[in-house]
Image (cartoon, helix red, strand yellow):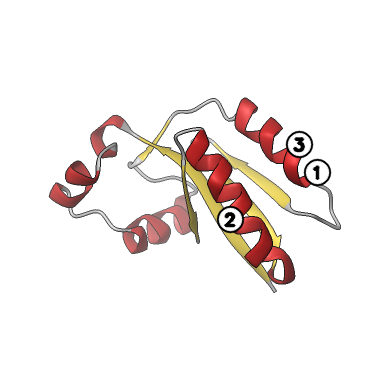
């Protein structure tokens, strides 16, 4: 079993909680569309290079047998984490995402 943690930057149209409430956006809706297309209108463009360097510095680089597998999408990243490590890795990756102004959610 594994867990997917998706990381993205909010697009300008969705970049504040008030905007997201007004547009009635929720994670379930984002998850559904992202699962089908690998994208969602709420996701904005972002250069993930520095964030990925920070993740690699903290957890090591991705490799087939762990600690994670990274899937790259045009406006998001998906960290596929082993269930046994998800409790440990999600707070680390999520914390780094926040430092870079990114959002992270389990999909």
CB within 8 Å, label 1 to label 2: no
**Circle 2: element type:** helix
Write the residue at 13% across / 48% down.
22
Q: Quadrant of residue 82?
A: bottom right
**Circle 1: element type:** loop
Q: Quadrant of residue 9?
A: top left
Of label 1 and label 2, which has the lower sequence position?
Answer: 1
Write the residue at 76% across / 46% down.
59
Q: Nearer the viewer, residue 93 or 19?
A: 93
Write the residue at 63% across / 27% down.
49
Cα–Cα span, label 1 and label 2: 15 Å
Of label 2 and label 3, which has the lower sequence position?
Answer: 3
Identify the residue position indicated by label 2 in the image.
91
Q: Which mark is residue 60?
A: 1
Cα–Cα span, label 2 and label 3: 15 Å
Which residue lies most toward the bottom here? 1
Looking at the rendered image, the disc whose residue lies closer to the viewer, 1 or 2, is: 2
Identify the residue position indicated by label 3 in the image.
57
CB within 8 Å, label 1 to label 3: no
Q: Nearer the viewer, residue 95 or 39?
A: 95
Number of numbered discs? 3
């Amino acid at each position: 079993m594994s867990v997917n943690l998706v990381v993205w930057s909010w697009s300008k149209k969705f970049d504040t909680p008030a905007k997201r409430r007004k547009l009635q956006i929720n994670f379930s809706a984002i998850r559904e569309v992202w699962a089908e297309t690998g994208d969602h209108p709420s996701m904005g463009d972002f250069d993930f290079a520095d964030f990925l360097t920070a993740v690699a510095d903290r957890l090591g680089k991705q490799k087939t047998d762990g600690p994670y597998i990274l899937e790259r999408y045009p406006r998001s990243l998906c960290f596929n984490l082993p269930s046994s490590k998800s409790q440990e890795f999600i707070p680390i990756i999520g914390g780094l995402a926040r430092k870079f102004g990114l959002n992270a959610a389990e999909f």
